[in-house]
Image (cartoon, coloured by chain):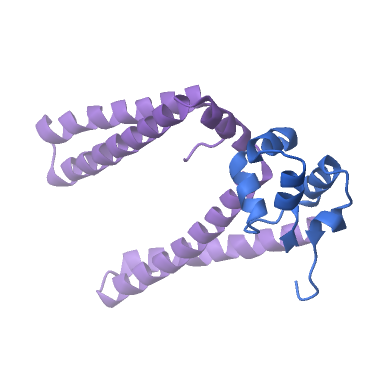
Amino acid sequence: MFCKGFSIRQQRLIGLGALLAGILCLPVALFAPVDDRTRGFFTGMGSALILLGLVQSIRLFRISRDPQKVRDFEVSKNEERTRFIMDQAIRMTFFVSIVAEYLAGLAALLLGQHTLGMGMCLLVIGQTAVFFSLRRYYGGKY
Amino acid sequence: MKNRIEEERRTRGMTQQALAERLGVSRQTIISLESGKYNPSILLAHKIAETFDSRIEEIFIFEEEE
């Protein structure tokens, strides 16, 4: 899912680590004497990690039961179609992130959150500048 | 780009799995190639053509508007 280059065993450990970290976050959210913002952070983070760990563990359990799927999984880590799919996903993520950040910045400015709005707009400008710089660099390289 | 991978594979009595193993790719890649959803790199196209003892242009049909 998020760590294609690792072996099944390594990915299983990462999934279990995420699950464990999520489980450890929840008691902090529920019982520690913290303010509401910190409690919200630990609840959200804990739930997300538990969900991620569970999805990863179930997926890997299903793959590891079938030797054919294990072979396909190992091969697909390094094949060109996987790299192509990853490139497409990264490209779309970048595009969606830029648009979302821009809209969030605009909303923040309209709602009077000037510091946040300016921060978001500067982030969009920074990312766009990095994009054009890298495009120029790779244009010269290839 | 159209291709004749499925046709050539069936002529040789190969399964998608066998072809995938021979090319060092996953079965899903063979499925995507055969359905025309994915166009291979020149290296993989060369490997496929070599597997079928053919030239690349005999397996992959290039169309002008592409």
Identified at 40% across, 34% down, the residue is A59
In this view of the protein, which residue sits in the foreground, A18 or A123? A18
Could one spot residue A6 in this view of the protein? no
Q: Work out whether residue A68 or residue A47 is closer to the camera in this orientation and state it.
A: A68
Quadrant position of residue A4: top right
**Relative to A126, does residue A4 appear above or below in the rendering?**
above
Q: Is residue B51 left or right of residue A30?
A: right
| Residue at 89 percent of width and 51 percent of height | B55
Q: Residue at x 85, y 53 (%)?
A: B56
**Residue A137 to residue A34: above or below:** below
Measured from the top left, where is residue A60 in percent x and y? 43, 30
Where does residue A25 sit, x and y in percent of width and height? 23, 32
Report if residue B63 is visible in the image: yes
- Colour assignment, chain A: purple
Quadrant of the frame with the N terminus of chain B: bottom right
Quarter of the image with the C terminus of chain B is bottom right
Lateral position of residue A88 relative to residue A133, left or right: left
Q: Residue at x 55, y 29 (%)?
A: A68
Chain painted blue? B
In the rendering, at what x and y percent does residue A86 appear?
A: 57, 49
On the image, the x and y values in percent for residue A88 come to: 57, 56
Marks counted in the figure total: 0
Residue A48, quarter of picture: top left
Q: Is B8 placed left or right of A94 in the picture?
A: right
